[in-house]
Amino acid sequence: MKQLYKKTSLLLILIITIGGYKIYFDSLPLTPVQKQIGKLNLSIDPRVELLSVIQSLSFYPRIQRDNPYYNTIQTHFQAFKNSDAVLLTNKLSKIGFSYDAPIEFVLHLTQPNECKRSLAYSENSINRAEGYTNLNNYQKALHQFATKTDFDKFWKHNKAFYHQIIDACIPELSDIDYITTLERYLKLSNNSYNIIISPLAIGGYGPSLSREDGTTDFYACVPLNWGQSNEIPYLKKEDFQVYLWHEFCHSFINPETQKYTRMIEKSAILFNPIKDEMSKQAYTNWQTCVNEHIIRAINIRLTEIHIGRAKAEEILNNELKNHFIYIKPIIEKLKQYETLEKFKHATFLDFLPELLTIFETIPANSPTSITKDDFFSGPINQVIQAKKTAIIYPTNHSEKESLNKIKEYTEKIHQLFFKEGILIPDTTALKMDLSQYGLIIYGTVPSNLFLEKQKTHLPFQIKGQTIITDREYTGVGLKFITCLPNPQNNALGMLIYTATNNKDIPDINNVFHGPEDYVLSDSKNRIIKKGFYKKQYKWEF
């Protein structure tokens, strides 16, 4: 009996001990999936993924939807779409707490198991949220969401997927040492450089976090391009080139220009000609525009030095088309910084006041002449910069159900992104003067009467399940996104969202597109081909 008692006691102790260890390990903070490449820390972070999950359940527009990862999130978390965290996300985004602000905020917190504030909130976060109370409430709501939804189990279940993404990205960072090249150019250095890949995000952001010991951590939070791989999506070196120099440069430059606010305000009149176009890109004041001009100019110089002139020229042309019309004089001044003896021992911060004087030399009455073009020349992003936008949906198809779904989809696009524009059927578009509009057209060529009228002028053809560009591509669910000049006004653009079948049109915007003239993708939004047209006499491949 005593032996049985001892065995039972030992068994109970063992069970209690094992259970205790299980509770202990389950309560450990989640950790990012990460790898180190030189000075770069590349990761997928639980805090950012918690934020993405909540945003994907909300009306927040800057989320990539209808990819496998998004669908997994919807399956796991759909029951919590009316949680406080989701409702607060909707509320805060309406008052301007969007783009970089949520990312910057969540990086001030500990991991989701605790979700406590670990650093003092920045002035930017507090202002964008309209007060500390909103941030405090949001922090509590995020923690509550993470606890109630078993977010830690979701994270652990998907860790293998996160590891695959990171492993696929590592080789793409081998060609260029982004940090060393940037530090040598600016003659500056920093405590840490962190790339956070966010699979559902749209757009890149470059927050920096100041620590109590006086050091600063720089971040480049970048989106995942779901069209880059047959199985595991990842970022290619071209994608990293778009973001890394740019985002880390923000952390060096933005705090310094704050010291010269009065000087920058002297040239604020230059904001007027580009105010509307800049606001569409979330650059709503002159100081921000100055920062963007400088950072984009630095990116162009680094690109020419380390990648090549052709690529630098391509980026420059895109920046001009996106209304960064003062960038050329900045580039010329940067060349002086690189070569003149008087700047040989100066850091970029020493040089910055002289660089800022460039804006005072630009005539206030003629800035638009710098980039005035008589003809639209792309890329896709340029179409949506038009002051007036018309979205045209199809009506000419026997399958009314697919037409209704396209109409519903375009109504959502209109409400989310182009409220100031007009939404019209193709039959109305054929009767209207649309010469002052950037056109956005949805549907197959036969189903959209406005598009069908232009079919002989299109550089591509669609026959059955085949899309013909420079060669033939055949498959189920192929989609094609392209820009061309507005047929009623060659100075403005026309953006076409088409496919081999109308049922594939809804959610076509989730194909990554914008910096190029055309994108061809498959049924799962994976990019097959993208690029630019030849435009000497007509637009062609």
Image (cartoon, grey):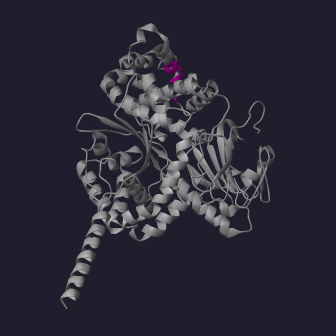
Residue drawn at 33 percent across, 64 percent down? 145
Q: Residue furthest left?
A: 2
Residue drawn at 47 percent across, 9 percent down? 340
Say how many tags the image has. 0
The part of the image, by quadrant, that contains residue 19 is: bottom left
Q: Residue furthest bottom?
A: 1
Residue 462 position (above or below residue 296): below
Q: Locate the N terminus by quadrant.
A: bottom left
Residue 417 position (above or below residue 334): below
Query: In the rendering, at what x and y percent does residue 303 appear?
Result: 55, 28
Query: Does the stretch in magenta take in 280?
Result: no
Query: In the rendering, at what x and y percent does residue 120 appear?
Result: 24, 44
Q: Which of these two is toward me, 174 or 233? A: 174
Residue drawn at 29 percent across, 71 percent down? 18
Q: Which of these two is toward me, 487 or 433? A: 487
Q: Which of these two is toward me, 530 or 94? A: 530
Q: Locate the C terminus by quadrant.
A: top right
Q: Residue furthest front?
A: 3
Task: Give the overall secondary structure of the magenta segment.
Answer: helix
Residue drawn at 56 percent across, 23 percent down? 305
Extent of the magenta region = 324-331
Q: Quick check: 380 left or right of 109?
A: right
Q: Is residue 387 visible?
A: no
Q: Is residue 87 visible?
A: yes
Q: Which of these two is toward me, 497 or 431? A: 497
Query: In the rendering, at what x and y percent does residue 372 appear?
Result: 60, 26
Residue 5 position (above or below residue 462): below
Query: In the rendering, at what x and y percent does residue 354 appear?
Result: 39, 15
Query: Does the stretch in magenta take in 326?
Result: yes
